[in-house]
Structures are given as structure tokens and as C-alpha cells.
């Protein structure tokens, strides 16, 4: 069973792959005579800097002052080794304040093997570190000009579990089908675990967590369908991930397990001036242990967003979005959460709704300015995930403004 | 079997002489430009060339020939480029440059404005 290969073996692949890739990249760039005729190597990148101001929560920073912790830089290369095999890699530097761990990381680094191609089918296998190819924006969630907004809808693109769902080290399979009756069908299947940093552990578990959070199992699948010549596209996806926590002596958190099972459905319409997108999520989070050894809890959260983008001119685009999220579908107003925690966790940690307005302005073909404002009710998508921090986040209503300039090539 | 030629688009699809395909239907062309078909045949990769997204010929090619808006192509290509899934077409700045590079690159495909009959290019017939 290919998918059952251990993730350790994939980690062993990543290092030699990066050395091989770096040397190839280096030698090719020396040999390449800059002629556009060298069609095997492609290099692209992006650089974005923004300013973000959050009033009423610790989503980005603790002092609630405007912050420049909104930096996204990436560079990638793709080299076609043969007609079947391609190497590709991207390194990024990200800083999002409290949203996720900052720093340089290998975003993806993979061998793309073109397994099969016919009149109707195209199947590729990706081996190494790949992205999450399953949701509307997941594969380029850190690439500003590919997103509808600077801050993605937290119901689906929850920054608190970013590193757990951004991709993984393992194997992915992408199969595309086409015929003139059915249209385009895309099947994606992947299994890959990512290393979990100490900061991601604290974002999940809380500041007092000094133990290790381990990624045990991962399986992700999605299907997308675009009827022939249609402006609509529909998708469904499933992700299933299991984690375990190893307590340290100094820890207030016990050993335990965490399982995240997420279902998604999305639809997108792309017209000449209007784009409509919607993505729905249902996530089941099962916790055993952690709070005390015999603790068991399973809650199902629901959420999603509907969004319209209007192309006013070639330069200017408007965004409107409405989003809802409930941490527990059986406790939408959070009253039970408040009761069960003896009032320690206020009811507004049970939901997070958001209205967003934004504009994108294309200054030139490769330079874009983005501006947006979010009106938010509830704090269910703030971190830490497992142990909400009600002392810091004492506002049910909070707001956020962000502006960002992005250049890409 | 009837083969109807496409309406006069005022555009021609051109390919390198090495390309052994002499006609394509619109659905195939669309697959090539959305990078869902990347080989002419086994071991013969397609090298796709485009003019910049804002170029009038590109806009015409995208909307009238492929029936897809230029921004949709940009989105598909950006997703491929920045996620590791694949590669985007190569962008050249002018039609003259495009003709030259398609003529000299094995497996290349591109498009140009209504053919200047003096130009020495290999035209691919597009059928609906």
C-alpha cells in the first residue's frame, strides 16, 4: 500500500531532494544562456508587505496597535528533467504575528511524475513535500495575488491549524479527466504528515503546553467538476488527520489524542464581471485525554462563507463576503460552552461570524494593492484552539483592517 | 463526417514544425492552454507560449477562441506556478517575438493575429 509508507521515509527523501534540486537549479542557471529557448527551467516569486490593525482581539498581536507583521515572500523553481519527470520547489518567508509561526520554510519540494496521459486522462504523482490541493484556496493560501482577500475566511482557512493543513511530506495523486459530455473532473488524493513546530503546538494547545504534538495519520481527498464550457465549478473534499500529544513533566496538559475530520463542499461561478464563491465546512474534533487522562469529547463545528467579487474595471475589483462559523453545531449560541466551563469560557467562543468588504487594485500587470475591513462577532477562531484564552479575548465584537502591496514575477 | 471550420477569428494558432498535429478542436486547445494536456504524444511535450494577459490578441484568443476569460487563465496558471502542481505558459511580449520563439522551440504552440501571408509559420487548423 503506497499510502501506508511511513512519513519518516518521506522526511528522508526531502533532504536529498533539496540538495539535488539546489545543485540542479544552480548548475542550470549557470549553463542557461538566458535564452527564452530554455523551456525547461522556470523561476517565479512574490513579495508582499502589509499593515494590519486589529481592534478587540489578539488575532495578530497582543497590544492591538497597527502591525507590520504581514509579510509574505516566496521564490520557486520548476525544472523539467524529462518529458515525464519534473522537479519543483518553493521557499517562503512568512510573518503573520500571532496567526502562525513566523520564519523561512520549504513550502513545497517535490518530484512530479507524469504517470499517464491520454485523450481523456492526465494523471500525476507528486512525491516529497506538497501543498494541500483540496480546498478552493488551500494550495496558495500564502500567495497574496491568488487569494480573494488578505485574510482568508477563518471558518475554512483557520490560521490556528494552518501548519497542520497546509500540506505534508508524503505522496499525492492528481488525476484529471475530460470528455465533452461530462466536462472536466479532477480527482486528488494525498497522504502526508508535516513536522509540528513548538509554536504551532502552543497555538493549538496553549502557552502552558511544553510537550510534543505529533502528526500520526493523514488522508485527504477531493473531487472537482466543471461541466463542459460551464462557468460553474463544484467540489467536495475530505480531510482526516490524527494527532497525539506527549506530555512533559512540567506540563499541565496530559497525554492525549486529537482527531480532526473535515468535510468540505464548494461552488464557484466565474463570469465576465462577477465571481461568486461559496465553501462550506463541517469539522468533527475528537479529544481524548489532554485535560485529564479519562477525558473524552467530540464536537462538530460548522461554517462557511459566500463571497462575491465584482470586476469594476481591469484595474479595480470589489469584494463582499459573509461568513459564519459555529464551534459546536449543537450549541450555536455557545451557552452550553459557557455553562460547562463554569463561566470561564464566555458564550461568544462558540461562534465567529464575519462580514468583509475589500478592494483589489492592479497598479500594473504584476503589482497589486489590496485593502479590506472585517466586522467580526465571536471568537471561536482565535487561538489557542484547545484551551481558549478568555482573559485576553474579552470582546464579543471586534474588527480588523488590512492593506497589502504585492509584487510577483 | 463533417468537419466545419471555425468562424473567422482573425487569429491563427501556430506551432513549431516538429509538431505532428495539423488540426485541433477548441476543447483540445482549451485543455492545452489550461495545462490539462501537456504532451502532443508520448515523449513530445507541448511548450505553450502566450502574450501578456492585457495584450489585445491574448484577450481575443482567450475570449473568442477558448471561451474563457483572461482572468480565469491567470488564476489557473498562478495556481499551478505557486503550488508546485505544474507550470504555466511562457509569456513573450510581442507577436514578432512569439513567432520567432515558436518557430525555434521544439513542441511549441502559440497564437498570432490574422496571418500575414508573408510570415513563415506552421498554422494549426482549429475546428469547432
Image (spheres, rainbow, N blue to C red):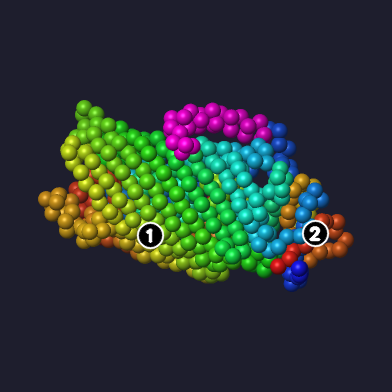
Q: What separation in Å lies between label 1 and label 2 (alpha carbons)?
A: 46 Å
Magenta-drawn stretch, dominant element (helix, strand or loop): helix
| Residue pointed to by mark 1 | A280
Helix, strand or loop under label 2: strand
Circles 1 and 2 on the same chain: no
Q: Is residue A218 above or below residue A137?
A: above
Label of residue A85 in the image? none
Front residue (pair A403, A27): A27
Which residue is located at x 73 percent, y 37 percent? A33
- Chain bearing tag 1 is A
Q: Is residue B55 left or right of residue A328?
A: right
Front residue (pair A304, A348): A304
| Residue pointed to by mark 2 | B123
Find residue A275 and report its horizontal and vertical position in percent: 49, 66
**CB under 8 Å between callouts 1 and 2?**
no
Q: Which residues are magenta?
A: A1-29
Which residue is located at x 36 percent, y 65 percent? A322
Amino acid at each position: 500500500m503506497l499510502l501506508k509508507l511511513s512519513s519518516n521515509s518521506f522526511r528522508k527523501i526531502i533532504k536529498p531532494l533539496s540538495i539535488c534540486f539546489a545543485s540542479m537549479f544552480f548548475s542550470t542557471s549557470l549553463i542557461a544562456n538566458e535564452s527564452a529557448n530554455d523551456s525547461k527551467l522556470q523561476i517565479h516569486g512574490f513579495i508582499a508587505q502589509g499593515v494590519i490593525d486589529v481592534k478587540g482581539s489578539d488575532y495578530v498581536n497582543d497590544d492591538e496597535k497597527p502591525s507590520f507583521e504581514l509579510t509574505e515572500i516566496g521564490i520557486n523553481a520548476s525544472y523539467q528533467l524529462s518529458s515525464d519527470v519534473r522537479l519543483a520547489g518553493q521557499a517562503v518567508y512568512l510573518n503573520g504575528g500571532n496567526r502562525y509561526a513566523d520564519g523561512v520554510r520549504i513550502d513545497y519540494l517535490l518530484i512530479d511524475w507524469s504517470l499517464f496521459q491520454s485523450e481523456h486522462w492526465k494523471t500525476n504523482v507528486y512525491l516529497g513535500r506538497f501543498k494541500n490541493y483540496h480546498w478552493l484556496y488551500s494550495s496558495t493560501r500564502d500567495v497574496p495575488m491568488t487569494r480573494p482577500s488578505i485574510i482568508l475566511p477563518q471558518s475554512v482557512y483557520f490560521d490556528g491549524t494552518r501548519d497542520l493543513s497546509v500540506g505534508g511530506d508524503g505522496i499525492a495523486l492528481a488525476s484529471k479527466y475530460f470528455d465533452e459530455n461530462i466536462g472536466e473532473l479532477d480527482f486528488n488524493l494525498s497522504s502526508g504528515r508535516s513536522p509540528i513546530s513548538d509554536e504551532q503546538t502552543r497555538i493549538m494547545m496553549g502557552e502552558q503546553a511544553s510537550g510534543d504534538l505529533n502528526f500520526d495519520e493523514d488522508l485527504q481527498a477531493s473531487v472537482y467538476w466543471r461541466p463542459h464550457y460551464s462557468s460553474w465549478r463544484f467540489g467536495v473534499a475530505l480531510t482526516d488527520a490524527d494527532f497525539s500529544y506527549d506530555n512533559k513533566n512540567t506540563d499541565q496538559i496530559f497525554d492525549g489524542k486529537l482527531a480532526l475530520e473535515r468535510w468540505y463542499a464548494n461552488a464557484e461561478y466565474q463570469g465576465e464581471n462577477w465571481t461568486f464563491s461559496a465553501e462550506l465546512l463541517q469539522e468533527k474534533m475528537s479529544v481524548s485525554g489532554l485535560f485529564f487522562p479519562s477525558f473524552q469529547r467530540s464536537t462538530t463545528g460548522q461554517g462557511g462563507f459566500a463571497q462575491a467579487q465584482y470586476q469594476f474595471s481591469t484595474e479595480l475589483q470589489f469584494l463582499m463576503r459573509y461568513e459564519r462559523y459555529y464551534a459546536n453545531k449543537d450549541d450555536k449560541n455557545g451557552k452550553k460552552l459557557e455553562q460547562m466551563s463554569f463561566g470561564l469560557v464566555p458564550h461568544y467562543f462558540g461562534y465567529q461570524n464575519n462580514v468583509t468588504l475589500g478592494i483589489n487594485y492592479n497598479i500594473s500587470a504584476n503589482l497589486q494593492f489590496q485593502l479590506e475591513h472585517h466586522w467580526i462577532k465571536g471568537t471561536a477562531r482565535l487561538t489557542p484552539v484547545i484551551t481558549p484564552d478568555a482573559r485576553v479575548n474579552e470582546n464579543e465584537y471586534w474588527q480588523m483592517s488590512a492593506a497589502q502591496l504585492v509584487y510577483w514575477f | 463526417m463533417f468537419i466545419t471550420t471555425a468562424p473567422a477569428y482573425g487569429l491563427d494558432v501556430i506551432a513549431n514544425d516538429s509538431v505532428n498535429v495539423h488540426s485541433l478542436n477548441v476543447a483540445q486547445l482549451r485543455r492545452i492552454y489550461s495545462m490539462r494536456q501537456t504532451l502532443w504524444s508520448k515523449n513530445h511535450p507541448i511548450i505553450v507560449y502566450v502574450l501578456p494577459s492585457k495584450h489585445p490578441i491574448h484577450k481575443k484568443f482567450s475570449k473568442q477562441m477558448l471561451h474563457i476569460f483572461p482572468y480565469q487563465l491567470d488564476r489557473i496558471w498562478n495556481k499551478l506556478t505557486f503550488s508546485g502542481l505544474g507550470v504555466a505558459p511562457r509569456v513573450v511580449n510581442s507577436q514578432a517575438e512569439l513567432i520567432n520563439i515558436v518557430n525555434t522551440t521544439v513542441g511549441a504552440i502559440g497564437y498570432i493575429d490574422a496571418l500575414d501571408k508573408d510570415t513563415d509559420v506552421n498554422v494549426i487548423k482549429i475546428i469547432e
